[in-house]
Amino acid sequence: MDNLPSESAKTPEFLYTMTIDDLDARLIGLLAAEPRLGVLECSRRLGVARGTVQARLDRLLARGVITGFGPDVSPAALGYTVTAFVTLEIRQEAGHDPVSHGLARIPEVLEVHTITGGSDLLCRVVARTNADLQRVIDQIVDVRGVRRTSSVIALDTPVPYRVLPLVEDVPRHGGHQYVRSP
Amino acid sequence: MDNLPSESAKTPEFLYTMTIDDLDARLIGLLAAEPRLGVLECSRRLGVARGTVQARLDRLLARGVITGFGPDVSPAALGYTVTAFVTLEIRQEAGHDPVSHGLARIPEVLEVHTITGGSDLLCRVVARTNADLQRVIDQIVDVRGVRRTSSVIALDTPVPYRVLPLVEDVPRHGGHQYVRSP
DNA sequence: TGGATCAGTGGACAATCTGCCCAGTGAGTC
DNA sequence: GACTCACTGGGCAGATTGTCCACTGATCCA
């Protein structure tokens, strides 16, 4: 039994887990705009039945499109006003894992990616001041397996992290699907 | 019962807007773990009165520590499985602003920072495939004022974006405050 | 020292929302 | 044509919310 009926009719198989329609997008947009809204209120605003909204939400959560409603905490409001991106070179013998592990133990390290290119890891860190950033970087360098680091400081953030434009784009263009005409 | 006796006593003026105490941290942690929890349930779990939780939440929101409860959308679940970091060099004459503006119009650009170092801007972008990434980068290059770009692809994300460790760290160490003994 | 201020408690209220159930309709599938 | 599925509109009991209140302790200040 396939639980995605008429939708799967129009939607190519390989996309069906990763596509949302206009109503989904509007729902996400609405929740993004007024996060503490209840299901009932959403249904009113969207002009659909409550059950529909409830079902849509459940599905979005089940599919992993919406991963949660965690409180968005601003590091800046906690005094961590300095953001920096630190790229690391590591000793390859050790592998990425132990290093990532070590980095994860530093609270100021908010995010770690392994990357292509000249470096091995890219992480986003915050600190209270530039001087404090030095302390954090020192901690990073102290992680076993880290050979050297290179940092750039984020001076400003003209576009803060956002996903909405993407969400609104998907149902319209099917997320630009897979290349049709190269 | 003195739950939070000396808070304002010990906390230096300049920090009080950016400091949270243990209860705040536990509240944020709780909400992060089970986002859809109500105020009442939180108060039960934390062992405090409902009014207290309500007041704390209001204050955290008012101070901007918690900026919202937006639904966390996973670009990957929408089919955008490729993440890349693109650094841009821009034509200085134009200034950052118009470029940021242009970038903001591209849905796949999730985040833009102005940075120190050899480049001018750093942005996080997503795409559906590596080929699709090329399309996005082309759009970026097309933005007026962009001179050249350089991209690295995120292969893996051993530490996804998180703030909790930071939140839990603040009340314990006062966020390492301002440098005491240099 | 006394008064003011503030955070927290415990209780109460009406209004609202939630989770869950149901039967019916229309659209698309096999 | 039979079937499946999303959606609708409704109903229900139970829980939660927003908002009051009076009272307690602790801190701050003149």
Image (cartoon, coloured by chain):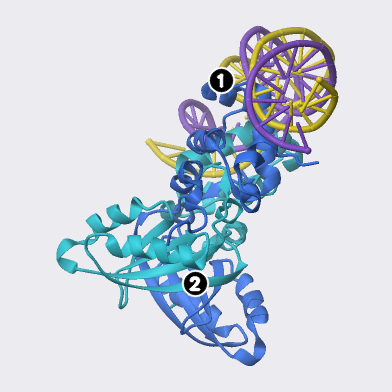
Chain colours: A blue, B cyan, C purple, D yellow
Which of discs 1 and 2 lies nearer the camera? The answer is 2
Q: Helix, strand or loop at disc 1?
A: helix
Q: Amino acid at mark 2?
A: Ile
**Which chain letter goes with mark 1?**
A
According to the picture, the residue beneath numbered tag 1 turns out to be A44
Circles 1 and 2, Cβ within 8 Å, touching? The answer is no
Q: Helix, strand or loop at disc 2?
A: strand
Classed neighbour count for the residue bearing mark 1: other residues with Cα under 10 Å, few (<14), some (14–19), many (≥20): few
Q: Residue furthest left?
A: B93
According to the picture, the residue beneath numbered tag 2 turns out to be B153
The N terminus of chain B is located in which quarter?
top right
Q: Amino acid at mark 1?
A: Arg
**Residue B53, picture quadrant:** top right
Taking the image as shown, residue B38 lies to the left or right of residue B141, namely right
Q: At x 54% / y 57%, what residue is drawn?
A: B80
| B59 vs C14, nearest the viewer | C14
Residue B35 appears anywhere in the view: no
The C terminus of chain B is located in which quarter?
bottom left
